[in-house]
């Protein structure tokens, strides 16, 4: 456990992690300020725009890091996944602020639960995307494939009339199917990482 | 022989079944439901109208009145009044009052056990806002000629409702029958109608006591009761004493719920930026303790942001009363308002009518409205008769006969008294006072000359002076 935390701490100190964390938090702070209403304008609708922005940004982040983690050693991949989860959790106070002032009908627990679960789910989707892209020798196109995947998931859900995979509509309404899908994906990824971690530990011991 | 037997059996069977079939037919014919909307079928748009449903040998029924008050541009906008009634064998009568707006489509259906027992509709051309004049008995051509409203309805005396809300759209009630119930006449007057009693009506002692003689006249509630001579010589016989709709509208617009104030963006931006900066610094330079500290900081920041930004309540409610009347009795209009932050169904357990132009489901004691986020709706409760705490003495002075202290009493001239305890006379008023609240100013603008506008903190009162009758009495 302590080794895991140490690896996570080291991963967070990597320049790419800090840059992404800074970028995500800055983008969310700017979004919050942009959608916040002026006093006297009546209703406060800031949470709706903010939650969608947060959801899409974190989905892109998780898909991107998941795709890159697919090519990393299991321990580093585990640390990368945890780093994405930490960034997602650290963005929650901004969402709580928007939620508190907006008073939406969607319950707060949905945001609190869906943020880490969705991050885990999109990480696994990203890992799958990364492996697939490398398998078909299109790894260089991952920076394009990640946003295209988010757009594709949105189009797929809209066409089918569901909220199962896309982060945009899932941010605003409670969707049990979305939660189930992301939980299953997240658990599958967690099991795979745990297995890979142990295997890596055994290899290290034998070496 | 066999054929003869068959013929006899057939005749016997027909003989037995025949009466049964006739009985069923008779029963089917006796089952009926009749709805009468308004007085004698005449509706007054934008007013409360009486509704009377007559059921004969019909079991549990559901009455639905569907009113579309939409426009061609905005589309349909339905209001559905629905009540379930037990019905039963014999005759059952259900009476209520419903607010009828200017409609595009108005239809009604009575259903029982999945079957439509009766239905009907009222053509759009009958959507008339003009008040009606009711005539009970035969008052003679002289009095009839004074009824200039153009909508005269002859009514039997036993069909006069006892609840004042039913007379919302009635301008004048001419009574030329001693069979009329005094309670019904007082209810009509309280609602704002001019009740005229002819000699035929005053032959009954109870009715004569309401007005005195042919020249007698008194302000009762927000209307008046007059003798026929007083009415004949009145200068403005057809006009009401006050415009109730305007007073209620002024009250409803002047006393609204204040939505929660939004926190300015600058503190939010500063707080969010500070949080992001601290978290990044702690993550970058804090090592493992820094990671844990950042997570704790996230939790603390969530709690710290929640309490100052979260409005205290998800919905705000208020109810404000307006009582217009005189001689210790008045008509009360209560305006309920609900402001909701999340979108939800607002349910009011009252007989009422939404003042906003929105769809609603109505019942005998229920109004249900779908409200969007950060929206409010005002619902006007069915008017009813209540006590009026301000009474004008014979010498013209006013006295607080209520149970509560009047915190404000104002006249149209701008004179104000701030405190009138229960039971006390209203002292001479002063012009040296604090600025009047917007509601008082709005009501004073619409109140007739000599009327008082008062408040006890819970309700607003417009007390009509008996001097109003100087205009109509010779």
Image: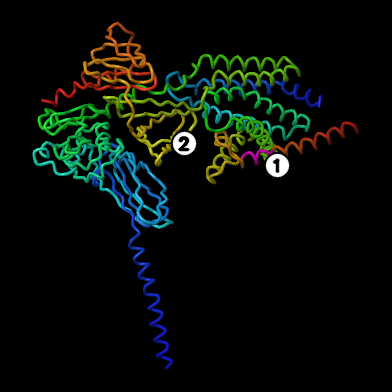
Occupied quadrant, residue B401? top left
From the viewer's perspective, tell me whether residue B434 is left or right of residue A35. left
**Residue at disc 2, secondary structure:** strand
- Which disc number belongs to residue B304? none
Query: Residue B345 has which mark?
Result: 2
- Closer to the camera, B312 or B394? B394
Give the percent coordinates (x, y) of residue B26. 34, 65
Note whether B208 is above or below B68 in the view shown: above
Q: Would you say residue A183 sits in the magenta stretch?
A: yes
- Residue furthest bottom as drawn: B1
Which secondary structure lies at badge 1? helix
Q: Which residues are magenta?
A: A178-185
Residue B220 left/right relative to A157 = left
Residue A135 disc label: 1
Where is A61 relative to B426, above or below?
below
Left or right of B400 in this view: A84: right
């Amino acid at each position: 456990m302590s080794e895991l935390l140490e690896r996570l701490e080291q991963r967070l100190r990597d320049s790419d992690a800090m840059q992404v964390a800074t970028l995500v938090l800055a983008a969310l702070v700017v979004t919050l300020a942009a959608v916040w209403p002026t006093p006297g304008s009546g209703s406060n609708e800031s949470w709706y725009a903010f939650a969608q922005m947060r959801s899409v940004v974190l989905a892109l982040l998780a898909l991107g890091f998941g795709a890159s983690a697919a090519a990393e050693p299991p321990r580093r991949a585990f640390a990368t996944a945890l780093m994405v989860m930490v960034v997602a959790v650290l963005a929650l106070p901004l969402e709580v602020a928007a939620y508190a002032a907006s008073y939406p009908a969607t319950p707060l627990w949905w945001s609190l639960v869906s943020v880490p679960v969705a991050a885990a789910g999109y990480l696994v989707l990203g890992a799958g995307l990364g492996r697939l892209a490398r398998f078909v020798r299109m790894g260089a196109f991952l920076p394009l494939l990640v946003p295209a995947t988010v757009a594709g998931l949105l189009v797929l859900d809209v066409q089918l009339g569901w909220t199962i995979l896309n982060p945009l509509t899932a941010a605003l309404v409670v969707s049990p199917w979305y939660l189930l899908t992301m939980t299953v994906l997240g658990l599958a990824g967690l099991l795979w990482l745990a297995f890979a971690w142990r295997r890596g530990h055994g290899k290290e011991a034998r070496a | 022989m066999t054929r003869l037997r068959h013929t006899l059996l057939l005749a016997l069977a027909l003989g037995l079944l025949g009466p049964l079939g006739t009985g069923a037919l008779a029963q089917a014919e006796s089952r009926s439901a009749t709805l009468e909307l308004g007085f004698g079928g005449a509706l007054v748009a934008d007013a409360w109208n009486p509704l009377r449903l007559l059921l004969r040998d019909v079991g549990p029924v559901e009455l639905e009145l569907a009113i579309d008050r939409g426009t061609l541009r905005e589309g349909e906008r339905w209001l559905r009044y629905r009540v379930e009634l037990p019905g039963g064998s014999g005759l059952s009568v259900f009476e209520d009052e419903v607010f009828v707006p200017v409609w595009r489509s108005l239809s009604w259906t009575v259903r029982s056990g999945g079957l439509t027992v009766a239905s009907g509709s009222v053509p759009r051309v009958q959507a008339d806002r003009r008040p009606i004049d009711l005539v009970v008995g035969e008052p003679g051509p002289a009095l009839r000629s004074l009824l200039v409203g153009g909508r005269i309805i002859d009514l039997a005396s036993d069909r006069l409702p006892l609840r004042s809300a039913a007379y919302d759209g009635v301008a004048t009630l001419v009574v030329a029958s001693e069979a009329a119930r005094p309670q019904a006449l007082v209810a009509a007057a309280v609602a704002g109608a001019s009740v005229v009693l002819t000699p035929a009506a005053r032959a009954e002692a109870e009715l004569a006591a309401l007005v005195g003689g042919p020249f007698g006249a008194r302000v009762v509630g927000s209307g008046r009761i007059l003798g026929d001579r007083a009415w004949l010589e009145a200068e403005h016989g057809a006009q009401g004493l006050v415009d109730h709709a305007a007073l209620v509208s002024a009250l409803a617009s002047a006393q609204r719920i204040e939505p929660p104030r939004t926190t300015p963006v600058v503190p939010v931006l500063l707080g969010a930026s500070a949080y992001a900066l601290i978290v990044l610094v702690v993550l970058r330079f804090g090592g493992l303790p820094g990671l844990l500290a950042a997570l704790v900081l996230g939790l603390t920041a969530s709690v710290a942001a929640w309490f100052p930004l979260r409005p205290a309540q998800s919905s705000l409610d208020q109810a404000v009363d307006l009582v217009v009347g005189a001689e210790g009795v008045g008509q009360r209009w209560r305006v309920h308002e609900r402001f909701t932050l999340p979108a939800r169904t607002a349910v009011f357990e009252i007989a009422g009518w939404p003042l906003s132009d929105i769809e609603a489901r109505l019942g005998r004691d229920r109004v249900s409205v779908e409200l969007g986020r950060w929206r409010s709706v005002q619902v006007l409760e069915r008017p009813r008769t209540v006590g009026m705490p301000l009474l004008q003495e014979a010498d013209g002075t006013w006295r607080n006969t209520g149970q509560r202290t009047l915190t404000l009493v104002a006249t149209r001239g701008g004179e104000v008294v701030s405190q009138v305890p229960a039971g006390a006379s209203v002292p001479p008023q002063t012009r040296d006072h604090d600025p009047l609240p917007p509601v008082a100013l709005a009501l004073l603008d619409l109140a007739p000359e000599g009327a008082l506008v008062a408040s006890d903190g819970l309700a607003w009162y417009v007390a009509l002076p008996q001097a109003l009758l100087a205009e109509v009495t010779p």
